[in-house]
Image (cartoon, rainbow, N blue to C red):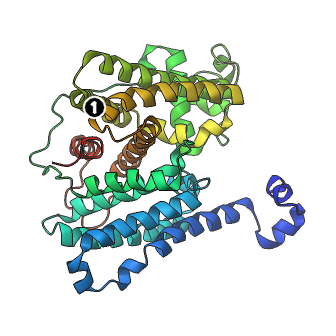
Amino acid sequence: METIAAKVGISAPALYRHYPNKYEMFSVVVSMLGQHLVDCTAFVDDVSDAELESDAAAVLDRAIDELITSAIGDREASGLYRWHYRYLQPEDQAALMVQMRKVGRRLQRPLMVLRPGLTASERWKLSAALLSLADSIGGHRLELSDDEIRPVLITAARALAATELPKPSEASVSRPAVWRIFTPSAGPYEALLHSAILLFGKKGYAETSVTEIAEAVGVPASGVYRYFSSKSDILTTGLQRAMDRFAGEMSAIAGVFVEPKETLSRLIEAYVATVFANPELTAVHDTERVNLAPSERELLRDSERVFTDTWAKPLMEVKPELELLQARFLVHALTEVVADLARLSRESKPSGDETASGDSGYDQVCLRRLMESIVMGSD
């Protein structure tokens, strides 16, 4: 609270007169971000059924455009509601979900006109993907002008909206593959890394102690320091390991296949499988990398650029209208959609979702289909 007060040029006691504690300020900001999404899509409720029937595609385009505008305005803070919501108390989490579902239903309204055969489950998947795509701007630091951002994301949104998702009875993971980043059975070093990342994902880096990490593995706290110099060293090693593995796997795949569509298809399959096999990593990567030292953050960005450019090359061959920066921008959007939908797959689904199950195979196939639509267009 003292740091926040100093940032805005007031005393800490003055700040406490407005907010009793840091949590209260956090919950207000998250609620405000959610309300921005609600407000910018409110026009959908005022569109008559006749207008919607006349041009549902235009209504959906406008909704996506409004969400993009909101994401640009909230770019520095959107991660608060996407990844830090786990810190919200139950009643505040519930209030945020009410906001998200309201936005989802508004996106589904033109979808139902454009594609009346969609099931409730399919509508929710598509609306979640569309919201994630529009808000993906906050997940990276690439600088692209507003005039360039909009056509890239709106074109991707149109492809998403037209995606033919497989039916649960038709879906299977055609080439089952699991890429684990950590192998906790390989000894204390790997076990400590794995347990630390799990705890960082569940509790947050600041709230996790070295003692808790040690207890999760069954070693004394002093035993941790045989392998790592500090808690920061564990985080740095875990995140760098993960990004190096991601980048290495993707580069190896790209080096095998010549045809760009086949390359992208294989990259998509491997990436989705890896994210589902390591569900804790995306949250930790997005929320906790701020705790790295500046030099370590720069090394991580170097690995991220290798990962991104591995995708950008075949993507530009499939979509020659894209320049390199636009292709990188779209790759970041892909990763945000995967992260968000994989997280939603693990959490409770909206009421009325008749396909909810504990098996992630169907969700993986749907996510692969959505990604293929973004990079290659919907057929």
Residue occupying the point 25% across, 46% down: 373
From what the image shows, is residue 182 above or below residue 353?
above
Q: Please give left or right for residue 188 compared with residue 331 in the image.
A: right
The foreground one among 23 and 366 is 366
Q: List the residue tagged with mark 1.
A: 264
Residue occupying the point 44% across, 35% down: 324
The foreground one among 58 and 122 is 58
Q: Secondary structure at mark 1?
A: helix
Rendering coords of residue 6 (x, y %): 86, 56
Residue occupying the point 56% across, 30% down: 196
Q: Name which quarter of the figure residue 42 lies in.
A: bottom left
From what the image shows, is residue 42 above or below residue 234?
below
Identity of the amino acid at label 1?
Leu
Within 10 Å of the Cα at label 1, are there few (<14), some (14-19), or many (20+) other Cα atoms?
A: many
Rendering coords of residue 119 (x, y %): 17, 64
Figure label count:
1
Q: Is residue 110 visible?
A: yes
Which quadrant is home to the N terminus?
bottom right
Rendering coords of residue 58 (x, y %): 30, 70
Rendering coords of residue 333 (x, y %): 42, 45
From what the image shows, is residue 276 above or below residue 349?
above
Q: Is residue 217 visible?
A: no
Q: Please give left or right for residue 13 compared with residue 253 in the image.
A: right
Residue occupying the point 25% across, 73% down: 56
The residue at the far front in this view is 321
From what the image shows, is residue 209 above or below residue 146?
above
